[in-house]
Image (cartoon, rainbow, N blue to C red):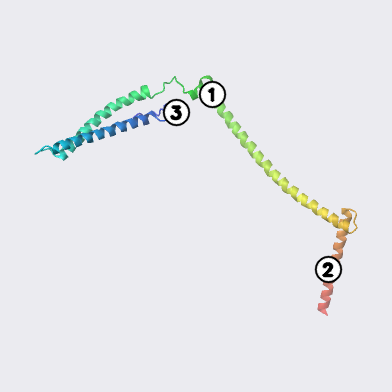
Amino acid sequence: MSVDPMAYEAQFFGFTPQTCMLRIYIAFQDYLFEVMQAVEQVILKKLDGTPDCAISAVQIRKCTEEFLCFMKGRFDNLFGKMEQLFLQLILRIPPNVLLPEDKSQETHSYSEEEFHLLQKEIEQLQEKYKTELCTKQALLAELEEQKIVQAKLKQTLSLFDELENVGRDHGASDFREGLVFLIQNSRKLQSIRENVEKEGKRLKIS
């Protein structure tokens, strides 16, 4: 069998020419075996109808196998020549012929140097794409952080609004006055706590 991969032919046919020839070889070989078996059966039937025949079935099988080996050797020799003709003249695409999907190469052919330049440009575009992708991911992460900060700021402003409302309920006109009011009340509560703790200690001592 041929060792030439014949990739261009495989692209056109959808199978490698060597595979095609192998299947033809197997089909012929199977047919040869079937014919020899049929001939052997006919001979055995003829011998069964012949009285006092000195030829046994074992001898018939041995002769069949020898004849089969002879025929297979002749067949392999002939098939090898047929395979060469098929692969060289029938199943081979001439080097000056292009498939329809490759016709664009006639008008858009590239030299090896141009191909390398194009490949280098593709690599640069890929690197640029990766850089832009990383930048996009960084911006998305920063945007998420800004959303978190914005939510905390909104929460803080809401707290300030609540404090301002409390101050207004107690007579404070703005947030600053309300904050002063809260500080004063906090100090009063702290003073009351200290007095309660001192009174508790005094009662324990007495």
Q: Residue 193: image x %, image y %?
A: 83, 68
Residue 69 visible in the snapshot: yes
Q: Quadrant of residue 198?
A: bottom right
Q: Nearer the viewer, residue 123 or 12?
A: 12
In the image: residue 170, left or right of residue 28: right
Query: Amino acid under label 3?
Result: Gln
Query: Going 59% across and 33% down the picture, which residue do you hit?
Result: 126
Can you say whether 181 is above or below 152 in the image?
A: below
Mark identifier at residue 31: none
Callout 2: few (<14), some (14-19), or many (20+) C-alpha neighbours within 10 Å?
few
Between the C-alphas of marks 2 and 1, the distance is 89 Å
Q: Residue furthest left?
A: 52
Say which residue label 2 marks: 193
Q: Earlier in the sequence, mark 2 or mark 3?
A: 3
Secondary structure under tag 2 reads helix
Asked if residue 158 lies left or right of residue 142, the reply is right
State the residue position of label 1: 113
Q: Is residue 175 left or right of residue 113?
A: right
In the foreground, 189 or 114: 189
Residue lying at the far bottom in this picture: please name it: 206
Q: Residue at x 50, y 22 (%)?
A: 103
Q: Quadrant of the C terminus?
A: bottom right
Residue 180 visible here: no
- How many labels sit on residues? 3
Residue labelled with disc 3: 11
Please report whichever mark, 1 or 3, sits nearer to the chain's N-terminal start: 3
